[in-house]
Image (cartoon, rainbow, N blue to C red):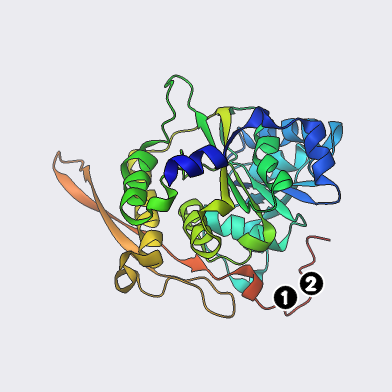
Amino acid sequence: MIPDWFERRTHRWQDWSLEQLLAAKGSTSVSLVVPARNEAATVGDVVARVRDALVDTVALLDEIVVIDSDSTDDTYAVATDAGARVFRSAEIRPDLGTVPGKGEAMWKSLFVTRGQLLVFMDADLLDWDTHFVPGLLGPLLTDPSVSLVKGFYERPGQGVLEGGRVTELVARPLVAIAFPDLAGLVQPLAGEWAVRRSLFASLNVPTGYAVELAALVDTASSLGVDAIAQVDLGRRAHRHQALRDLGAMAVQILAAAGMRGMGVEDMVGDVVGDADGQPGVDSVELVQYAPRSDGSTGPVVRAVPVGERPPAVSVPADPAGAAEAAS
């Protein structure tokens, strides 16, 4: 099954010209969403380059929206100056509460964007180009049977299509064991992907780093793996995270997988938010070890949040009627 799916659903960004995509777009609205936390050094370049190429030069995008996830640096100001519509995640639908996390920012974007198609890009890109956006839109604009598109890429200096440490050591083995229908995906955790709003708004969304894997699993479960496509975007580099932070990411991915059929539900408790839109609040205690000042080794305990937001379509309207940020 995998070779057949791979051949039918794997594309290159060069497969569509901008002219073809603009013709296919017609009246379809498209939003670029950039979740960002303390990315003042790079988010301005991401926004400015995409705006120049795909908003001002050709109208492939209708809006660029940055969701600032509890930044303590100048991310908000830099993104605003670069031409994005910027929202602080905590200030979007405050009646629904707020939790930290990438998935939270992406879920909150549904309340302040207009696009029928959503393209997600990370804010920490270092080696990339604006063709990422049209590449991800290609399958969605030209094939109505596709609902979600994942990007994959070569990392500079590696010369291979590795997906990073968490992908190779956690996500790919997890897919092989629990979700083999997704084994044809080159980089399941890639931060560059696109989705139909109608689909994303119908999904439970982990508030942390498991959002990408959860969206794939839930899409395959509800629509079948043929609703997913992937696109080779060429090269991409980003800022690397500390190994202990990757351990927390792995916990979130395993917890999300557990909520999707691996029998971990009893371990992680009430993870999914309730009917009024509030987030799940459970966490997993991760014990790591570090040297002490006296030369000994001791435990470092961190609570890793593994909560999920319920489908946005199930969330009640803003009771105050004041959250018209998307207008």
Residue 257 image-quadrant placement: bottom left
Callout 2: SS: loop
- For the view shown, which residue lies furthest in the left direction? 296
Give the answer, above or below, for where 320 lies relative to 9: below
Q: Which one is nearer the viewer's eye here, 184 or 267?
A: 184
Q: Residue at x 53, y 65 (%)?
A: 222
Which residue position is annotated with label 2? 322
Give the answer, above or below, for where 70 lies relative to 266: above
- Horizontally, residue 223 falls left or right of residue 294, namely right
Residue 146 in sight here:
yes
Which residue position is annotated with label 1? 318
Where residue 14 appears, as percent x and y from the top left, is 67, 27
Q: Which one is nearer the viewer's eye here, 275 or 186?
A: 186
Q: Residue at x 37, y 47 (%)?
A: 171
Callout 1: SS: loop
Q: Decide: marks 1, 2 in contact (CB < 8 A)?
A: yes
Tag in front: 1 or 2: 1
Q: Which one is nearer the viewer's eye here, 133 or 85?
A: 133
- Horizontally, residue 277 falls left or right of residue 243, namely right
Give the answer, above or below, for where 101 lies relative to 311: above
- Horizontally, residue 268 falls left or right of residue 48, namely left
Disc on res. 290: none
Where residue 228 appears, as percent x and y from the top left, is 56, 50
Q: Residue at x 76, y 30 (%)?
A: 17
- How crowded pointer 1 is (Cα within 10 Å; few <14, some 14-19, many 20+) is rated as some
